[in-house]
């Protein structure tokens, strides 16, 4: 109440110094706030990016260590063998380590590649010529996806063979056994015998032997072989006989049919091309960040196969299960040491590698 009977007049607040827009930002204040936010982002973003890179590199090293264990049957204490060449991806998948084949920075899915057929070829012995005419034909060369020998002029490829049975006319193949092919299948035949059907499945390649109709024969015997023999008469002794195919003296399906090949999967890692299946040292470099499943060490451009994807560094695991990080330049120096000192070198590329102070 008022202290007197005089009319009390309640004073009203004066006009806002901002013209009635209480709490609003001026243009200058907005510019200052935006500048501060931009400055904080500029300061924190590289740090956050580096944190993510460190996390990826750590996960990648864990992958390599687990892959190394899988490749040696899960036992790193007394390893008996290491799958050499492209077979290492098959070993990883066989031990349930498919998910480890990719670095967290890669977004590709592992898939079966035709490169899985690189070690396989057809062998023919022409009995008509007295058994002295041996012919070797590389599967990848026949399919046109790789290099290799094709010594047999009677090779028929998928596109040369009709997709349905056709009548037999004179000396022409009858193809009475030819199945209807799917998009994931390829057919290869020596005349109308020695025929295989290749099916590319999700995680493996299936090879079926198909026996001809028996109306004609080419007067020869055939085998599907695995290895790298180039001297026909010695191949049956030097390389692995995968299965015997239909021919003059063998008109049945081999018990080994169908035969399965574990595919070479797309992977973020590659194996040391110098490592040997049953002769390696615990300090020898085994797997590393790479752009191909096998590092062809010493060949032209082999360093380009190594991927320094983690802030310019390369992760690798030794045959003894020790995971380390290095640079491509240091790996090149290790190889120069290996070349200079030969079998007695202590380079990481050598199976006689020993621990050194600098590592």
Image (spheres, rainbow, N blue to C red):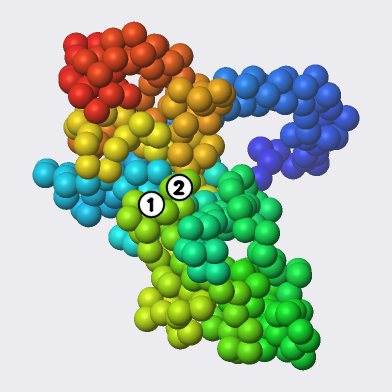
For residue 36, side relative to residue 245 (left or right):
right
Does residue 304 appear in the picture of this structure? Answer: yes
* Numbered disc 2: secondary structure: loop
Extreme residue toward the top, this view: 340
* Count of picture labels: 2
Q: Quadrant of the C terminus?
A: top left
Are circles 2 and 1 on residues that touch, CB within 8 Å? yes
In this rendering, the answer to whether 32 lies above or below 93 is: above
Among the 4 quarters of the image, the one containing residue 44: top right
Q: Position of residue 251 (x, y in %)?
A: 48, 84
In this rendering, the answer to whether 253 lies above or below 100 is: below
Work out whether residue 294 or residue 214 is closer to the camera in this orientation and state it.
214
Residue 231, numbered label: 2
For residue 293, side relative to residue 22 (left or right):
left
* Numbered disc 1: secondary structure: helix
Q: Residue at x 46, y 85 (%)?
A: 252
Work out whether residue 162 or residue 339 is closer to the camera in this orientation and state it.
162
Q: Residue at x 39, y 30 (%)?
A: 315
Q: Residue at x 19, y 32 (%)?
A: 282
Q: Residue at x 22, y 46 (%)?
A: 81
Alpha-carbon span between mark 2 and mark 1? 6 Å
Residue 185, numbered label: none
Does residue 258 appear in the picture of this structure? Answer: no
Q: Residue beneath label 1, please?
A: 234
**How packed is label 2: few (under 14 Cα within 10 Å), some, or many (20 or more)?**
few
Q: Position of residue 144 (x, y in %)?
A: 68, 53
Extreme residue toward the left, this view: 78
């Amino acid at each position: 109440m008022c202290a007197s009977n005089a009319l009390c007049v309640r004073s009203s607040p004066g006009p806002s110094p901002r013209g009635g827009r209480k709490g609003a930002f001026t243009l200058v204040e907005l510019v200052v706030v935006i500048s501060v936010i931009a400055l904080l982002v500029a300061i924190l973003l590289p740090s956050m990016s580096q944190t993510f890179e460190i996390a990826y590199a750590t996960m990648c090293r864990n992958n390599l260590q687990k892959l190394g264990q899988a490749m040696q049957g899960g036992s790193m204490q007394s390893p008996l063998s290491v799958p050499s060449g492209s077979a290492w991806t098959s070993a990883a998948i066989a031990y349930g380590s498919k998910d480890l084949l990719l670095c967290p920075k890669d977004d590709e899915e592992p898939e079966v590649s035709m490169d899985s057929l690189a070690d396989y070829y057809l062998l023919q012995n022409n009995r008509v010529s007295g058994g002295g005419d041996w012919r070797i034909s590389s599967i990848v060369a026949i399919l046109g996806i790789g290099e290799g020998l094709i010594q047999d002029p009677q090779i028929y490829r998928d596109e040369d063979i009709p997709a349905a049975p056709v009548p037999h006319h004179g000396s022409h193949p009858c193809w009475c056994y030819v199945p209807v092919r799917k998009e994931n299948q390829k057919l290869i035949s020596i005349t109308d015998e020695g025929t295989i059907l290749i099916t590319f499945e999700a995680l493996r390649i299936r090879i079926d032997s198909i026996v001809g109709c028996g109306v004609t024969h080419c007067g020869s015997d055939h085998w599907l072989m695995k290895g790298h023999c180039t001297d026909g008469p010695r191949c049956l002794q030097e390389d692995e006989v995968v299965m015997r195919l239909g021919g003059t003296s063998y008109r049945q399906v081999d018990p080994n049919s169908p035969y399965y090949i574990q595919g070479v999967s797309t992977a973020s890692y590659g194996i040391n091309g110098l490592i040997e299946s049953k002769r390696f040292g615990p300090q020898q470099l085994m797997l590393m960040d790479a752009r191909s499943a096998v590092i062809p060490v010493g060949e032209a451009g082999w360093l380009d196969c190594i991927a320094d994807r983690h802030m310019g560094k390369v992760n690798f695991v030794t045959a003894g299960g020790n995971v380390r990080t290095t640079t491509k330049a240091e790996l090149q120096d290790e190889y120069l040491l290996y070349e200079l000192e030969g079998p007695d070198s202590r380079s990481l590329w050598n199976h006689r590698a020993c621990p050194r102070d600098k590592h």
